[in-house]
Amino acid sequence: MKNLIVVFASFLAAALVNARQLPIAVRGQPAKYTVVRPADASPSQLYAAEEFQRFTETLTGVKLPVVTDEGPLPANAILLGNTRHTAALLGAPADMAGLGTDGFRLVVKPPHLLIVGGPVRGTLYGVYEILERFGGCRWYASWHSVIPQLETFEVPVIDETQKPAFALREPFWFDMFNGDLAARNKANGNAMRLKEKHGGHSYRFGGGLGSCHTFNALCPPDQYFDEHPEYFSEIDGKRIKERTQLCLTNPDVLKIVTSNVLVRIRKDPGASFYGVSQNDWYNPCTCPACKALDDAEESHAGTMIAFVNKVAEAVEKEFPDVIIETLAYQYTRKPPKNLRPRHNVMPCLCTIECDFAFPIDKSAFKENRSFLDDISGWGAICERVYLWDYTTNFRDYISPFPNVLALQDNVRFFHTNRVDYLFEQGAYQGRHGDFAELKAWLLAKWLWNPDLPQEPLLEDFFNGYYGAAAPYVRTYFDALHSFYRDPAAHPLRIFDNLHRTRIPDGFYTRAALLWQQAETAVKDSPAHLYNVRMGAIPVLYTRLVRETRQEPYKVWVTANPRHYDTSSTTRSLATELLARFAEAKDIRLSESKERHDKILADWRTLADPPPLPPAAASVMIENTLLSLSNRGKWGDTVADPLASEGSAMKLYNSHYEWCTTLPFLNVAFDRGEKYRLRMRVRVEKKPGRDGEAFWAGVYDADNKRSCGGIERKTSQVGDGYEWYDVAEWIPDTAHLFWIGPGQFDKKGGAESSIKALYIDKLELSRVEQ
Ligand SMILES: [Zn+2]
């Protein structure tokens, strides 16, 4: 920490030596300056005075007095907001309207410093700008600030005005929700815990609706579907209740939604935005009326905008200032051809499909190319656009996601495309995703000013956050990003699987070494050591994932179980990850809680694996070990007294292809040896019909070929359970056993001949040769 302070102090001394300086505070001397605030200061202006006083004292040991502007102008003043003395010193009234809620003007009128800003957030932001730029204060994370020790805290002669590039600035990352961290980095998003002293929230989504996916809340299928299926999506001629959207051309749906929106606004007035938007899946309505409108508009945004416009028109009569927000997301992302959103309708455009290794407009990836068309299309027909961008890997927050070098250009790109409200979604349920704190901090900086040069910000963060480890972490960071230099190559997407990125295993071995060196470099600095140990998690995790299989073996039929023993590397990586997990405060591994828990459970199993089963030449496989697609719809596990363990997997005969499988990825077997697979099944026939009873086999997914199988007609099977030979072959991990019911004769247009198919168990045996 000490070295860092010296570096900062000497840097400032060198940079400022020639300019005329106001000596705000000098270490060891009595306070010469007085902070002057308006007598009727707002909560954020009171906090601005407090923060200026607090950090000046931390910087220099000098505590400046704070007074109101009711008294005479002090000999040396720091004037906050639009004080009684401000206009006289400026020679004209301050342009408060021009500054808006968040902008500020910094002016030195020797010997005074004027931080002119409005009562909402402008004054407070002006104070932070002075402390950051001239005091060297940095707020990198809620637990990690750098406040240098200065001999003199000086401010040069200056007259500049700053206003934010985006009205709503939301780096949606967990740690940035901390109100102080957000305000100090000038972020004003909805998720931030901004109190009155931070200036509160700028724009709020009201009515308990949140910012997205509100159809189910505004017209619930549970309430309406049974009596009015026509309110919901028609798919292939049938109205659906599960994963449904609304039938947007139905006039009753419009009445219900409009009335619910109005009720919610009346209950929770005063918010800026109220959301009327599609649920988080596809299935837009394709009834004749919806289809006709969408066809004419060449997008499902046709019905959406027509509908939302009508809601917004009704809302405007009672609430003229309210904006109705809707999604331009997935199936509605393409703007309508002729329709125009009303002036009080705001589309929220989402980048979910894009490649993020490169700036959105510079990647050759097809989704990026179509996104360009969509954003310029919406920009041309809307008064305002809300942009929802994605800045982490959501499958695994702790997976390396080298998007940092594209962030600034993306923010700039959104700015030039008329985006006012920018939502940068990252790891929002916990800390320490891949470079999480760096990304959140950079985004806050660029959402305020997209033109701040990238390299000085990166250097600033690496030095301040990692201390003496910075060179090692930076080497890793640069190398990681170097794998994505070709804009025409494999894209970087937000649900990428670690096995399928273009970064080779060898890189992570070298990377682990760099992080070890980083750790050694800061072993005596606990604050930096914590950041380094958390920063290394993505590399440890990737090595573990690449080193081991993620699925446990379900079936053991091998003469050599020790071949399947967990390697010592795997055990030690898992142990190390568990140690860091225990050390971390509020770490989150994945967006999905289920996956977060699974990753953690896998680490525990891999660190301390269960004892290996004994060698076996043959094994019975209960039906519960088979995977089943669409459980409940294609089949389920049911009680069956005829089955050997009293339960069976019943296939409903509602789907003719393979419903249930046993992937050999989950089987521990002996490579190169021949095995025999048998199954015990029974067929529930339809009386008086003869046709297909079932089909089953073993499939080689790599080579797309069959390794053996069986088909039976109802006339060839009895009524009870029988054993059938399925295949005799040499298994591979890419193989899978599959079985489907007799419905498959429908392929030929015939009537199905069975009611259901029951699977009791399989038997897998090594064939001695
Ligand atoms: Zn419809």
Image: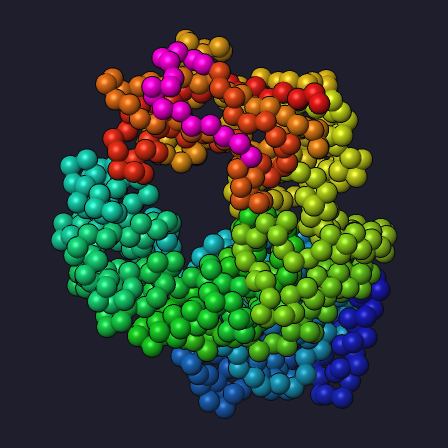
Q: Is residue 710 magenta?
A: yes
Single out the residue that lies furthest toward the left.
251
Q: Is residue 259 above or below residue 711?
A: below
Asked whether 299 or 490 is in front, the reply is 490
Q: Which scheme is used to colour this image of the protein?
A: rainbow
Q: Is residue 648 above or below residue 341?
A: above
Residue that appears at 71% across and 88% down: 20
Q: Where residue 553 sits in the image (x, y, percent)?
A: 64, 29
Question: Which image quadrant: the N terminus?
Answer: bottom right
Q: Is residue 568 magenta?
A: no
Residue that appears at 64% across and 36% down: 732
Residue that appears at 65% across and 69% down: 485
Residue that appears at 43% across and 65% down: 387
Residue 639 seen anywhere in this rendered image of the structure: no
Query: In which quadrant of the rendered view does residue 32 lie?
Result: bottom right
Asked whether 663 or 24 is in front, the reply is 663
Q: Where residue 491 sits in the image (x, y, percent)?
A: 57, 62
Q: How many marks?
A: 0
Q: As drawn, is 680 to the left or to the right of 141?
A: left
Asked whether 293 or 21 is in front, the reply is 293
Q: Where residue 49 sits in the image (x, y, percent)?
A: 57, 66
Residue 256 seen anywhere in this rendered image of the structure: yes
The stretch of residues the image draws in magenta is: 707-722
Q: Where residue 536 sits in the image (x, y, percent)?
A: 73, 51
Asked whether 650 or 433 is in front, the reply is 650
Q: Is residue 152 above or below residue 254?
A: below
Question: Which image quadrant: the C terminus?
Answer: top right
Single out the residue that lies furthest toward the bottom.
91
